[in-house]
Amino acid sequence: MNRGTMNVEGVEVSTEHWIGGERIASDQVFDDASPIDGAIIAHVARGGRREIDRAVAAAKAGFHAWGRTPPQERARVLHAIGAGIERRLPELAAVETRDAGPLLRSMQRSVVPRAAHNFHHFADHLAALEVPDFETRGHRNHVRWEPSGVVALITPWNAPLMLATWKIAPALASGAAVVLKPAEWSPLTASLLADITHEAGLPPGVFNVVQGLGEEAGAALVRHPDVDRISFTGSTQTARAIAAAAARNLTPLSFELGGKSPFLVFDDADLDRAVTHAVGQYDHAGQVCLAATRLLVHRRVYDAFLTRFLERARALRQGDPRDPATDIGPQIAREHVARIDRFVQTAIGRGARVALGGGPNEELGGLYYRPTLFVDVPGGAEILQEEVFGPVLTLQAFDDEDEAIALANGTRYGLAAAIFTQSRARAERVSERIVAGTIWVNCFFVRDLRAPFGGARQSGVGREGGNWSFDFYADVKNVCTAP
Ligand code: NAD
């Protein structure tokens, strides 16, 4: 039985569930290990069907009042949650770095502020929602976004706070109540977030956290008949299981899934800028869904690109993510390192040539994988098709725009793409032909919360962000009134 809290990096973190405004224990626990050194940092409540039933019932009860709370008041509470995140920035950053391994300085500078911004943004967006109003033969049509009910959120381990808040904020803004099942490899900041929502005055039951494993708590949540929406970020494989469960109740779902995004460098590109962003694909040890891991470079600039890339990539410092000098931290878990290494060894077996890295960084222990680059990869190799979710890139040359586009579109994914060219006309042409939810031209990872976000093909179902989030989390209704 787990009870109470653990001290993580000097911060008291509850390891229990948060249900109906109370901390609830479970009979069983699971161990939470830190990717930095593999140390067990918490024994976390392992919820199952019982806890999910209780949380969904609490959310249903919480929804009654929250769904009727005026939008201005909902927005006020959301801003208070955003302010609470800002106030507790040092704690959230320290705990998530210990729990999931991102660089501490990235947590402090960008991730935690962005988590707060998620709440501020969707609070403001709610106030600014444009209500379409139009006439049909004298009849007035008035569109409304009505609160929908109980929203189930399931999130992955790679960016736990950011990805959870990106869903929680619009769901709460729309008037829904939430049950969050965080990833079992990085469960802790969700627990701190529960405290913050409580301190901000969010009524009991409107936000609930059930900790546990995907096959247990996660599976029980997505098949629950009282869940009105499922928003899931994670792997394409898990999405299939969730879609099958959701089909039983026809629960509307939104999926943000894996990727194998292309990174195109044309011969007129600003090569320094392209190389900077290409090396940036190793950020967070490659554990980023959007990572553009397939470098496609025009043959005329291939050698120059490769030389500069290797120079820059060899200078990256790998180590403890709490050290300000570190550029690349650990992988999330030993199992994940083994998975990455299987991909790398298979690629080597297929004849791909290792230009950089190619194995774990033994000096740092078993959790750090060396930034790796493959060249001369035979067409059709698995490493060109499957998401590795580690610091592993491939480099291929192309001769013209058509070939670049064919290579870029040559996987079952379609999450994002990056294009480097100085020609505006080419950027437009190529953007039009690449299948992806987000395309960055001469930049990478610039995100505006008003923009739609999601994946084409097997990288996702639906879009979130801006009005798209409200379209998903709310019940959209048209009221047509006679003159
Ligand atoms: P995962 O699919 O293994 O797990 C994600 C979540 O689903 C976890 O909370 C897990 O407990 C839960 N889960 C597992 N099985 C379940 C089941 N049967 N029913 C319900 N829930 C279940 O993914 P992961 O390894 O945690 O994350 C990495 C993946 O996430 C990568 O593929 C990555 O590309 C993707 N991702 C996508 C985005 C995006 O925005 N598109 C963002 C981040 C990560």
Image (cartoon, rainbow, N blue to C red):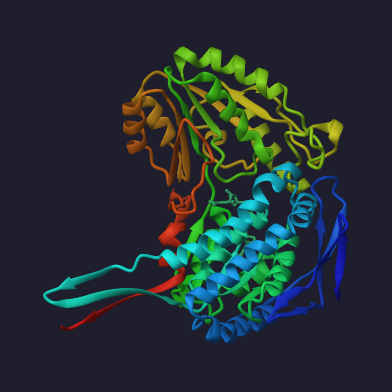
Q: Residue furthest left?
A: 137
Asked if residue 10 is positioned above or below residue 102 in the image, the reply reads below
Residue at 55% from the left image edge and 20% from the top image edge: 272
Please provide percent x and percent y for residue 445: 54, 41
Residue at x 66%, y 62% (from the top left corner): 83
> Quadrant location of ligand 1?
bottom right
Quarter occupied by the C terminus: bottom left
Q: Is residue 94 left or right of residue 70?
A: right
Q: Residue at x 73, y 74 (%)?
A: 47
- Nearest to the observer: residue 272 or residue 405: 272
User: Is 277 displayed left or right of 21 in the figure?
Assistant: left
Counting from the top left corner in percent of width and height, residue 194 is at 70, 70
296 horizontally vs 178: left or right: left
**Nearer-the-camera pick, 12 or 461:** 12
Q: Is residue 380 above or below residue 271?
A: below
Q: Is residue 228 above or below residue 382?
A: below
| Quadrant of res 53 | bottom right
Residue 133: where, in percent of width, then height?
A: 26, 70
| Above or below for 140 versus 393 | below
- Number of numbered labels in the structure image: 0
Residue positioned 50% across, 79% down in the render: 149
361 or 12, which is in the foreground?
12
85 to the left or right of 64: right
- Residue 176 appears in the picture as rendered: no
In terms of depth relative to the viewer, which is nearer, 259 or 82? 82
> Would residue 322 be visible to someone looking at this image?
yes
Q: Quadrant of the N terminus?
A: bottom right
